[in-house]
Image (cartoon, rainbow, N blue to C red):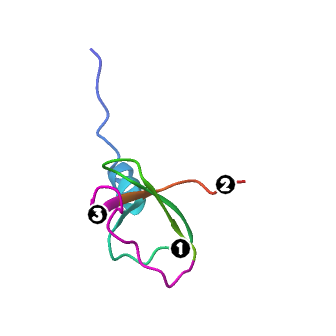
Amino acid sequence: MVGCLPKDPSDKRKERDMEFHTGDQPEEGRYRCKNCGYIVRITSDTEKLPACPNCGHHEFEKLEDED
């Protein structure tokens, strides 16, 4: 019999920790719209995430820093 391990609740928390919304004031970096893929660049720690300029969506994910 094959058993299934319960899903680690920290997986969802990690997912949520990487999700940002319009009005959030995240750290500097690049954020991709979860709806259309448009990339918004935040250049100051005081700058707030806008609604996506391309589609108006409000959820973003942080991209890895460019090297």
Residue 2 in the image: x percent, y percent?
Answer: 29, 18
SS for callout 1: loop
Marks 3 and 1 sit apart, C-alpha to C-alpha, by 17 Å
Query: In the picture shown, does residue 37 fall above or below 28?
Result: above
Name the kind of residue labelled 2 in the image. Answer: Glu
Task: Please count the marks in the image.
Answer: 3
Please tell me which residue is depicted at 32% across the width and 70% down the height of the picture. Answer: 22
Span highlighted in magenta in the image: 44-59
* Local secondary structure at mark 3: loop
Residue named by callout 2: 66
Residue 30 pos. (x, y %) = 53, 61
The image quadrant of residue 6 is: top left
Q: Is residue 14 magenta?
A: no
Residue in view at x 52 percent, y 54 percent: 63
Q: Which residue is mark 1?
A: 27
Residue name at image x 28 percent, y 24 percent: 3
- Which comes before the other along the chain, label 3 or label 1? 1
Q: Identity of the amino acid at label 1?
A: Glu
Which-is-in-front pick, marks 3 and 1?
3
CB under 8 Å between callouts 1 and 2? no
Where is residue 57? Give x, y as percent.
27, 59
What number is the disc on residue 58? 3
Q: Give the spatial CA distance, label 2 vs label 3.
A: 23 Å
What residue occupies the far bottom of the structure in this picture? 46
User: In this rendering, is residue 53 above or below 42?
Assistant: above
